[in-house]
Structures are given as C-alpha cells and as structure tokens.
Image: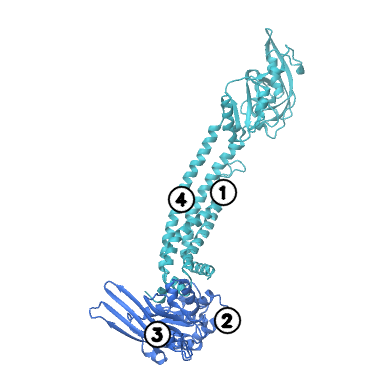
Amino acid sequence: MHHRLKDTFWLAGRDYRNEWQMSGFFILALAAVLGPMLILFGLKFGIVGSMLDNLIEDPRNREIRPVGSGRYNRAWIEELRNRPEVAFIVPRTRAIAATIELKSETGNRILPVEMIPTDRGDPLLKHQKMPQGLQQLILSDSAARKLKVQPGDEISGSLTRRFKGRSERVHLPLQVTDVAKLASFSRDGAFVPLYLVESAEDFRDGRAVPALGWSGSAGDEKDRTYPSFRLYTRSIYDVSPMSDALAKLGIEVSTRAADIDIVRSMDRNLSAVFWLIAIIGLAGFSLSLSASLWANVDRKRKELSVLRLVGLRTADIVWFPVIQSIFTAFFGWLTASLIYLGVSFTINRMFVSQLESGDTLCHLLPAHFLIALVLTLAAAILAASMAGYRAARIEPSEGLRDI
Amino acid sequence: MTTPEVSTGNGLTGDKVLIYHLRDVVKTREAEGTAFRLRVPSLQIALGEKIALIGESGCGKSTLLDMLSMTLKPSEIGSFRFRSEKGAEPVDISGLWRKRQLNRLGDLRRLRIGYVMQTGGLLPYLTVRENINLSRRLLDMPNDGLVDELAGDLGIRRHLDKLPHLLSVGERQRVAIGRALAHRPSIVIADEPTASLDPIAAERIMSLFIELVDELHITVILASHAWRHINRLGLRHLEHHTHREEDGSMTETVVTG
C-alpha cells in the first residue's frame, strides 16, 4: 500500500523537461514578476535600512536636551547616570559663563568659543584623545580651522570678568589633544573637562580658583547647582521613554524623536506599499499558472489516465501538477534571484560615489531570499491545487480508448 | 467438493484454471430516455485462453472490457471472481467494489493486468525503453532482460532510446504491446489495438502479439471489429446478442461464454 511519489516525481520531471519551451516560459514569467519585486524590496530595505543605521549611529539622535534652565545638583545627576537608558551624562554650567577666547600662534585673530563639558565616553568624541586636567581641550572642526591648529598644538585661552568694579583678564596655556569631527559640533567650540568649565564659571562669578591661581571669594563646592546637562541614551529606542520619564519630573526636553518617527513611519508605509505590489504580482502570477496547469491537465488527460491505468493512485496523480508547479516556483525564484543580484550590483556600483563607505542602496539578507522562495512555493502550490483536483477526477478507463 | 465443477464456483473446470468467473453481472446505463444494458449471465475465461470479442461499436464491447479490467463498477453483480494464477486464491471483485476498496482494485490492475490501447497511449516524455519498462518500474521489478527481449521480438530494439514521436504509428503500437507485456501480467486486455493501422501492418502486428502472449502464457482478451484475421489466429469468440426494443427505448446485449 505504498505511494509512488518518487515515480510521480520522475514522471512529472520528465514531462516538465520534455516541454522545456513551455516550462521555460513560465519560469521566465515568474522571474519577470519576482525579480523586480526583489529589487524593489532590496531598494526599500537598503535605503530605509541605511537611514535607520545613520539614525542609530549618529549620537545626536540619542541626545536629550533640557529646554530652558533648571537647578540640578550633582547627586541628582548621578542618580540619572545610574538609569539603564542613560549612556552618558555630564552637567552643563551657565552658557554665558562657558565661553573662552582662544588665540594661536598660527592664527591671526582671537576666537571666542563655547566650552562644552565632556568626560570619558562622550558619544560625540568617539575614538578621540580625551582632554585631561585644566589645560587640555578638543577643538571643534570649525574652531580648529579658524585657529589653524593641529592636534598637539599649544594655544592660549583667556577669560574676562568684571570684579569689584574692575575689568580683569586671566590667561591660561592650553593644549589641543584632538579635533572633533565636523558632524559632532558645527559651531566654534571646545570640549573641555567639566572642572575647567566650572572654574571658568567660578572665575566669572568672582570666586577663587586656587588650582589656576585665580583670586576671588571662597565658594562652597557642595552647593553647586547646574542649569542644564548633556544626556545621551544608549539607543534611539530609549529616547522616547527617557524623555517621558524626564517630563514626569517636570523637565521639558527636546529630542530628535520626531526624526526617528518619520523614518520609522516611512519604513512602515513603504513596507505596506511593497506588500501591496507583491501580493498583486504574486496573485496575478498564481492565477496565470493556475490556468495553465488546469489546461495542462486537460491536454494530458489521456496520458494521466494511462498512468492511472498502469497503477498510479489518485493521490499520486494529484501530485503531478503540484510537482511541476514546484519546479516552476523553484527555477523562477532562482532566475529572479540572479536577476536581482545582477541589478543590485549595478545599482550599488552606480551610486557608489554618493554613498558613505559600507552603505548599500540595494540590499537583501539571505533570510529575504528564503522568504521569497517560501512565498513563491506557496503561491505555486495553491495554483496547482485546482489542477490537482481536476487530475484526481480522471478515470483510469479513459485511458483505454480514444474519446 | 471432490469433483470440481463450474457450478461449485471455485474456479476450476477439469484441469482448467479460471482467471475470470462471472455470474449475473449487469451494467445499465441510461441517458435521455434511452437505456443500454449489458448482461452477462455467465462468463468463464480460463488461464492462457485467447478470447476475441468481435462486434460493431455500440454493442457493449467497451463496457465489458472496462468491467473485466476492473475500472468500471457493474450495476449488479451475482458473483465476480478473478484468479491471477494457478494455485492462487480467487479474489472476490464484487466484494472489493461493494466495499469501495478502489486502491486494492488499482493494485490488482497494476500487478496483474496489461493494456494495449487503440493508439498507443505512450507517454511522450519517456523513451521507448522507459515506456516499455513503466509498468515494471511502478512494481519495482528488477531488470531481467525481458524489456530488451520484447523489443527484439517486436522489432523495435533500434528505437529503444528514442522518444515515441519519432516512431511510426505501427512502431508505436508495438511499443504499446511491449509495455502491456513487460511486467508479465496474468491477462492482457486489448481494445482495437490495430484499428489505426493499415490492414497489412495490422495483421502482422496482431500475429506478433498473439505469438508473444502464447510464449509468455498470458491470457488475452481482444476486442475488434475486424473478423478476417482474428479467425486465423485461433481465438475463441465470445458470443453476444444485441436486442433492441422497437420504440428504441432499450438496448440490451447479452454476453455468454
């Protein structure tokens, strides 16, 4: 009571090969539907994927800035640092007090820049030589250009204040440890250790900074509060929950969450459009394959009934059109994949100059090819089911004589 | 039960082993006010016998062949037994039909029956060799040289690796005969096997066919409308009479033998 699936497979395969023109036509018809779909999806996946990658990689998208100023003490900042969403946090001093005038030997003018407090792990200064102590800084690209300095160069900084009715100026030697990337900070700025910014604020507020020999009134380090902070979350997906959490504490923040949402909703909408096209395409192919398989069963009625007569069972005969449609699905998918590989290679070559290295415009994962194969097989088997049903109704006695 | 008789229904008449033993088998077909009935009060075919069923089309030949080849269910069955070989238990075909064991009937067909169709019925995508070997392949029979031997006897050895469309109609019919015999069935059923051939080729192929079934001890039932050369081959005629009602409402054919 065994099924003769291997014989049916062999017979269906021989028939498929014998009618290679017709088989080839259907393979190409499938490839003509599936190939462009793979390219379309490859483009969507590649473009939206690299947009998302850029969002993820650009630390500015993970930044949360408080709007306006508050009063945050060190303990509160430390508490925030311990939250799992937080990758980096450093307090900011008052913006007006955080400026410094820089002068280099090579540059011919004095450049006022804003000081940005930094610390180890600053997402804007990845892989850069961090400044230490009170006499080192990292310049922004634009500032370094105007001062005509390189990493390692010595420059001098100066601060002014009005103290007890007199204008005072202090100078301090500074070393440029590195230059930040253009994307990190576009204005004239200097990344400095927090202590240097705090010292500048102290100086402007008339407090003494003994470490730098600046005189003034004594201050209490414990009472220090900061009006703002620089905060970066671990991933772009932490931005929304973190800003919600801060909003609950009454801190209004600004983020790039909207940008992230735009890309994500674009991804969703493009996916919907893609699936619509894919479903229409596959359904059309499925219908035309279905009609041809159905007609095939009628055309091969005599041959199929002969097979019934020599002993193949109904269940075996049903497989005949199904196996052939599986062949079409597989070879059509293979052809479409080759078309895709050729076209995506060409597209990526064409745009190679416009892309950052590592980015590809048209890109699919192995899993996508596998999904395409499974969907195509499903559509083909569905198409063959009607023909299989028709084949099952062929009586063996039909093969005995010509009708 | 000491002296086996036909009436005992055990399939033995003297030293003859009955491959078919039918009693009161009826097939009725009705279409638009006219009815056709094939009635077989009694039919016994012995193993190794060569039977000819001769008559015009419409007389019920095909209906009888379909019932004997177990592809058509009779309307009424007194009894229908099939014994595939000497010493084998007869199979109760009426029981298989009643219990709708269609796959058992299919297995029986595959194993025991060979068919020669009017126009080949060869599979166009298989070579001549694969066509002849098809029934053997479906039975997982190992190659014992019979396919080549048959091809030699049938004069088609040089065509073995060709596809059927490259052969003449007569050659294709020889291939069909080879396929019907290759798995050494108990019985070969041939419905007008030479109808599409010219008379000379038809006679030659028919003689070859009968020679081969004789050699292989295979029972044969041959339906044909050609009288002449059938008589010469020493086949037993199956008697049948067709009776028509005067108003045309009923045609009945009675077959005995």
Report which residue position mark 1 lands on. A364
Name the residue beneath numbered marker 4.
A279
In the rendered structure, which disc, 1 or 4, sits on the residue that comes first in sequence? 4
Q: Secondary structure at mark 3?
A: strand
The amino acid type found where label 4 is placed reads Ile
Could you say which chain is coloured blue in the image?
A: B
Identify the hue of chain A. cyan
Q: Position of residue B202 (x, y in %)?
A: 41, 86
Q: Amino acid at mark 2?
A: Asp
Q: Chain of mark 4?
A: A
Q: Which residue is mark 3?
A: B43
| Sequence-earlier tag: 3 or 2 | 3
Three-letter code, disc 3: Leu
Which label sits in the foreground, 1 or 3?
3
- Name the quadrant of the C terminus of chain B: bottom left
Counting from the top left corner in percent of width and height, residue B34 is at 27, 75
Disc 2 marks which residue? Answer: B144
Q: Residues within 10 Å of mark 4 (few under 14, many from 20)?
A: some
Give the foreground label among 1 and 2. Answer: 2
How far apart in space, not on screen, are marks 1 and 2 (Cα)?
54 Å
